Amino acid sequence: MVGGLLPAGTTLPPAPHLLVVLLATGGVVAALRRRRPGVTARRVLALAPWMALGSAAHVLYVVDALPSLLSPLAGSPTVYLTVGSLAGAAWLAADAASPDRVATTLAAAGALLLVPVVAVAAGTGISSDGARWSAVALALTVPLAGAAWVGLTRFRPEAAVTGAVGALAVFGHALDGVSTAVGTTQLGFGERTPVSRILLELGPIPPVPVLGEGWLFLLVKLAVATAVVWLFAAYVRETPAEGYLLLGFVAAMGLGPAAHNLLLFSVAA
């Protein structure tokens, strides 16, 4: 019964891999708690490449393009701990080496790791249809997310305090919604998360061009994301460090799956 509540493909790695990941994660968390590096909006935004890195690594897992030694580390949900521990270690190293340039160093490190992972995925073969629809999804998301952010900050001006991190959360969930709708409607992909699958399979719903019946899923994603950003506004204003960090987690829950969709469509459609 519990398995029916989890996304399809959820697995645990072999015990040795799981032990390594848990020890690495525990060690990094302990080090972060001990050092307590400063948390700012710029530093949370610098984690965006790392959010995409986890998704890209999981795509390599899905298309079986990883060495057998590394493959278990990129399964779901293990990949989140794997990349999270790497990002935390990079943050600690950047804070120790140059506290004034943490955001730049953290973003650059994530991007340098992301590029070869995407290149390996692309090397397995590019689907012209998948790449085209991924580009369409991205192009549609920009104005939709922009309109949602403008509407939110005008209707609830206090939400503007979340700044670029709040905007990233809205954009990430908008991109997840659009890419999921496009993938199911145009490319025949299925949704692995049970709750999302229920929304996508509700009927009868009148379809719209490009998004098909998936427009309802997108609408729900945008409504939830904007509501969460608005609710986090007071938290960010009163406790910026914790507020930005948790809002960054919300952004990752949208941007990560969205990046996974776009790359997977491009190589496996």
Image (spheres, rainbow, N blue to C red):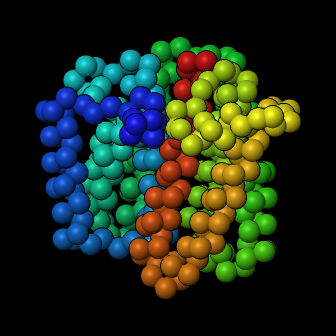
Residue 160's quadrant in the figure?
bottom right
Query: In the image, is residue 70 above or below residue 248?
Result: above
Residue 206: percent from left, percent from top: 86, 36
Q: Position of residue 22 (x, y in %)?
A: 19, 46
Left of 179 or right of it: where is 143? right
What residue is at 53 percent from the left and 38 percent from the top? Answer: 194
Q: How many numbered discs sit on the rendered protein?
A: 0
Q: Quadrant of the C terminus?
A: top right
The reply, left or right, for residue 259 in relation to residue 207 is left
Q: Is residue 257 above or below residue 88?
A: above
Residue 211 in sight? no
- Occupied quadrant, residue 129: top right
Q: Residue at x 45, y 40 (%)?
A: 5
Horizontal side of 198 relative to 152 (left or right) equals: left
Q: Tell me if 45 is positioned left or right of 3 in this view.
A: right
Q: Residue at x 59, y 73 (%)?
A: 231
User: To which quarter of the image does residue 91 belong?
Assistant: bottom left
- The quadrant in which the N terminus is found is top left
Q: In this view of the protein, which residue sits in the foreground, 119 or 134?
A: 134
